[in-house]
Amino acid sequence: MIVEEKITSAEEKFEFWRGRVGIFLGPALFILVLLLPFPALSSSAHRLLAVLALVITFWITEAIPIPASALLGALLCVVLGIGKDKEVLAHFADPIVFLFIGSFILAEGMKIHRLDKRISYKILSSSWIKDKTSRLLLAIGFISAVISMWISNTATAAMVFPIVLGILRSLEDLETTGSEKVFSKYNTGAMLTVAYAASIGGIATPVGTPPNLIGIGMIQNLIGYKITFFKWMLFALPITLVSFLALYFLIRRLHPTKRKTLPDLSQYIIERKRSLGPWSPGEKNTLIAFLVAVSLWVLPGFLAIFIGSESKEMNFFSTHLPEGIVALIAASLLFILPVDFKKRKFTLTWKEAVRIDWGTILLFGGGLTLGSLMFSTGLAEAIGNDLMSVFGTSSQWGITAIAIGLGIIMSETTSNTASANMVIPIMIAISKSSGVSPLPPALGACLGASFGFMLPVSTPPNAIVYSSGMVPITRMIRAGVFFDILGFLIILLSLRVLCPILGLM
C-alpha cells in the first residue's frame, strides 16, 4: 500500500524553499569554510570541516537525496586529499554494512509473504483485548514495537498503518451515533502510538533501526569495543519496555476517549485473517529463516553466561558466525528454500530482494567514512573541545546528557541515520578529551537519535500516520514534546543504572 503524505500549504512552501536554499547554501558554506582561516586545525581537518559543512547542510535541507550527500562527502574526501581512496571507500564494505543488507533482505521476505500481517492479526484477535479501548491501544503499540525490533521502523509503520486505519474506520462504521466525535482523540492517539512505538521498538535490537548499527560500528571502529547482539539487547530492551509503558500512559492521558468499550471487531479481524488464507510455503520458509537468524544472534549471549566469554564455543561464534554473517545466512536461505521446487520457485527472487533500502546502506557507509576521518584528522577532538567550553561540563553523565539531548534535537529536523552519523563521533571525541568513558555518551547519542517525535518530517513513521488525516499537527507537536522529554530522562537514567552493571564503562 502506497501512502501519500498529506501536508499543509505552509509545509509545502517550507519544503519547496528548504531544498532550494540548501542547494545554494551548501556550496556557499563549503567555499566559505575553505577560505576562512582555522589556525587550530590541521590542513586536512580544515578541508574535512568544509566537506562536513556541505554534507550536513544537504542532509538537513535534503537539497539532494540524503544517500547521495553521503557519497558526495566520500568522493570529496578523496578529491581533496583528506584520505586515500582505499581508506575512504573501505567503510562501504564494513561488516556492519552486510548486517544491514542481510536484515533488510529478511525483512523484505516478511513483507512479501505477509508474515508480519499474520502476526499482527493473530495478536489483534486475542481474547484478552475483548472490548476494551485501552487494551486495543496497548495491542496496537505492542504490534508496532515488536515488529520494529526486527524490521525497519519505516517498514513497520507502513505495514501496521493500514491495519490500524481499517480498525479505526470500522469503529466509526460500527458506532451508531456521533462516532467521529467520540473516537476523534482516540484515533489520534492510536495513530501516534503506531508511529512512536515503531521508533522505540527499533531501539531494542541492533537490526531494529539504522542508528543502532551506526553506533555499534563507530564504537567498534573508534573505541575498539565490540557490542554483541545479546549485550545490546541487555541494556536496550529494558529502555524500550520503559519507553513503551511511558508512551502508553502518555497517549491515554493526552488523548482520552469517552468510550471505554469497543463495538464488536471480531468479524472484521476474522475477515482480515481469512484474506491471508492458510500458511503458505513462503511464509513458513521466511519464518524458518527468521528463527535461524534470531537464534544465532542471541545464542552466543546465553552461552557466554553459562560457559564464559573466553570458551572455545564463544571463539567459534565470534570468528565464524558474527552478526553480519548470520544475517547473510538467513537472507541466503530465502533464495534456497523452495516454495515450488518443480517450477524452480523459491521464497525470494532477486528482483524482490533488490527493493531493499540501498540508500540507507550507502548513507551508513558514508557516515562511517566521515566519522573515521574526523578522528584521524583531529577534527572531532577540536569540535569536542569547543563544545566542552560552551556547555561547561566534563563529567561522565553531564556529557552523556548532552549527547542524548543533541541526538534528540538533531533527529527532529534530520533523519535519525544522519543525526547518529553527526553526533556520535563528536561525543566520542569529547569523552576522550575529558578523560571519561566514551561508551555511555556514544550510546546516549545513538539512542537519542531515534527519539524524533515532534514533526511529520522528524521520521518516516510520523509522516505515514500524519497522512491519515487523523493527526492534527498541533497534537503531534504536543505529544512529541512530552515524549521527547520523557525519552531524554528514560535514556539518561537507564544508562546511568545499566552501563555500570553491564560493564559498558
Image (cartoon, rainbow, N blue to C red):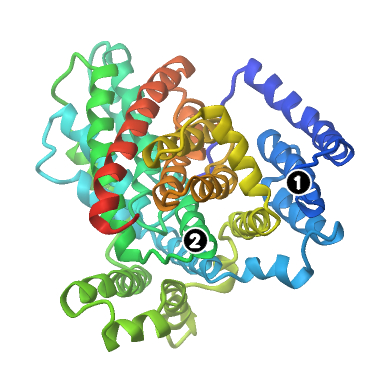
Q: Is residue 348 above or below residue 417?
A: below
Three-letter residue code for mark 1: Leu
> Seen in the image, is 87 located left or right of residue 319?
right
Can residue 274 be seen here? The reply is: no
Residue 315 image point, x, y percent: 34, 84
Q: Residue 223: which disc? A: 2
Quickly name the residue at label 1.
41
Q: Can the viewer see residue 230? A: yes
Query: The disc labelled 2 sits on which kind of residue?
Result: Ile
Q: In this view, does 95 lie above or below 493?
A: below
Per the rendering, the mark at residue 433 is none
Q: In which quarter of the image is the C terminus?
A: bottom left
Q: In which quarter of the image is residue 61?
A: top right
The residue under the point 48% across, 69% down is 102
Residue 238 drawn above or below residue 394: below
Residue at 86% x, 56% y: name it.
Answer: 80
Dot 2, how many residues are within 10 Å of its Cα: few (below 14), some (14-19), or many (20+)? some
